[in-house]
Image: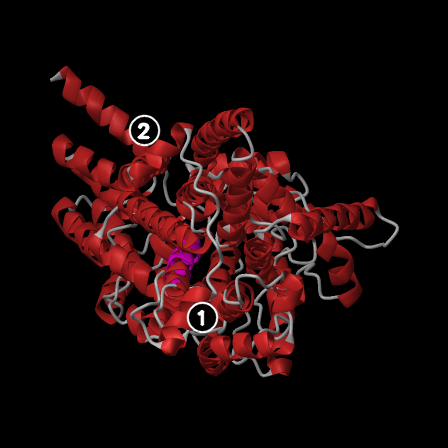
Amino acid sequence: MSSAAKSPKAAKLAEVRLPAAESGRAGIGSLSDHPRVLLAVLILVTAAVYLRSLGDGFVFDDVELIVDNRYMAQWSFLWKSFVYDFFWVRDPFALPQSLVYRPLTDVWFTLHRHLLIGPAGWHATLVLVHLVAVWLLFKLAFRLAGDFWSAMLAASLFALTPVHAEAVVWISAAALPLSAALELGALYVVATRTSPARRHSATALLLYLAAVFSYDGAIIFPALVGSYVLLLESPAEATVADCLQWPRIREAVVAATPFALEGLLYLAVRRIVLGFFLSPLASMAYTPNTQALTNSAEVLLTLPHVAADYAGLLIAPFYAGPSHRVLRVLSPASAEFYWPLVWLGLGGAALFLLLRGSPRARLYAFCAAWTAVAIVPMMNLRGIHPDLLVCDRYLYLASAGWSMLVADWAVGVARRSGPTRQIVTVGAVALLAGFGVSLWHIQGFWHDDVVLFTRCIDTFPESAICHGHLGLTLKQRGDLNGARAELTKAISLDEISSAPGYYALGQVDAKLGRTASATTEIERALAQMAGAFGHYRGLGKKSTPAPANAYTLLAELYDQQGQSDKSRALLKYTESLPEGLEAVWMAQSQIDWRHGDADSAQALLNNLVQRFPEDPRVWVMQGLAMKDQGRNQEAFTAFEHAISIDPYDPRSHLFLAQALHAEGRNQEALHQCQVALSSSPDDASVRSLAAEIQRELGQH
């Protein structure tokens, strides 16, 4: 950058830029004369590789946050996103439900929910965010490295690394690419300013503010700004050691301060909304009933294993996947403790040698700092489920710094000689091709919940959460025996936090007609939940003993066993709970139907739709009742009303399809099946009905 016609401050800023690498135009270097074409090719290739994700459905937390989230259908969900935690929909009467506060990600979800039906559009926009991040990284790398091929290779590695499959393919992980794209944009604005006075431009500050309110891990961004100013704005002749002098440190702190103040603003809002800053012990809904790492010694012993696994995934991303077998470490004599320390030590030594002998040491030091700092939020093991200590998605921003380091080093090696250039070029092309193939393959793990959790169990058989979620998925699909086996396994692996497992197991046994065992399991679940309730009350946490539906299910089981007095008493108690009256009326209507009292059941259903008209569940129940009575037109109306409230619920579309099919309106029924499959691509009941309808249409 020429400083001839600029102010003294701008001239000073220009002269301290990191020197560019040798241009090396020989061979394929001539391709750099067409940077836009090459970047466009990279964007198109990346988009093509991620096309597979468009066929994936809603999985894991997507179902809870999006598909079954009846609150998101209301526009009031937008402002509630700012005053509740990310998972508040689990139980809005027991808040907070998690450590997570990401209001802008909730806004992103809400807009999608109102504009799109089915997961394909959600996947497409998330891929688009990733492509924007790739473009921004190219521009930032080119700015920092001063070399086209270094920037191009960095962007390519970042675009195609298999470790990004989880962040880009799993809809619930959208916060990470969203936040990372905003942070890359903010850092680029900081790096391309024309004078120190514009370092904290409104654009950079607004981008970072949006980033941190999208993903809590963005709280580390001020450290990236400080590292950039410290290492890359020192005089060109300065060494890394020279950069670590007090005047430089002071300037870096000053540069990072406005962003740090925005981070503090986020923490203050988080404290007001959630009631805490970072502590999981008084906040996580599962803490009193889980095997979480709450012991400081266990945390310290497990940290090296977690850090080494993240480092290993960056180095060898072919091992990416939806789960990683990382168990808590209980002893310093364990190989799971000292071997990770050895590998981390060797990695640190290799980095030291690279910094010591390279004229690009300051750039490499910045990239290494970027990588390490971006992983730091994941070292708070107290707030992470013990089965999820290592997750690929948390490497999204860290991999940007790592990609820049590897790319610039490789390009530097390539320029040493002609043969070396050929070796590096062939190696880079082969590596990127391998990345693309592996990335395409790994995306398939996120196709649906059965595929996802089966894969998780294959790689982490001791994971209670994977067995539990596979059991819940099989229950939803009607495979009750398979669900029972998986839920039983989950309980055996994690007896401490088994209340949800016992509740789900009770639901399965109730459907199997095993009333006595179902009653015992629901009673055990409620007893554990009541114990947690006592703990929460002691902390002053707003909570309820258990969801009202759990009590009404037990009341129905009591009624089936002839214990009508216990059933009525439990229903009476449930009325006093949040949403208890609605749950009681729904349960009582089912009991009345079972006893043949259709008039009483219908009266309760009528009361439900009048009292709770915004709940799609009551319209579904109304529709099923009308259908059983042969009042098909009224059933159609009820199902359509449920769909208008919650167009994502595949059950409503299935029930409407069944009613239409019974009337011989097969084209309309098939359309409803197709809509249901767009939300739940592998729903066995919907697929079976669709196949039956298609056979009948083919016969005509």
Q: Residues within 10 Å of mark 1 (few under 14, many from 20)?
A: many
**Label 1: which secondary element:** loop
> Is disc 2 placed on a helix, strand or loop?
helix
Would residue 179 be counted in the magenta stretch? yes
**Colour scheme of the picture:** secondary structure
Mark yes or no: residue 87 visible.
no
Q: Is residue 388 left or right of residue 626?
A: right
Query: What is the quadrant of residue 92 in the picture?
Result: bottom left
**Taking 423 as reference, is 265 left or right?**
left
Question: What residue would you read off at disc 1?
Answer: 85
Q: Quadrant of the C terminus?
A: top left
**Circle nearer the viewer, 1 or 2:** 1
| Alpha-carbon span between mark 1 and mark 2 | 38 Å
* Along the line of sight, the residue nearer the viewer: 689 or 676: 676
Q: Is residue 459 magenta?
A: no
Of the image marks 1 and 2, the number of the one nearer the N terminus = 1
Q: Position of residue 636 (x, y in %)?
A: 16, 47
Tell me, for residue 688, which label it has, or none: 2
Q: Amino acid at mark 2?
A: Ser
* Region rendered in magenta: 173-183
Please name the residue shown 33% across and 52% down the image: 596
Kind of residue sitting beneath label 1:
Asp
Dominant SS in magenta: helix
Label drawn at residue 405? none
* Residue 461, image x, y percentages: 66, 38
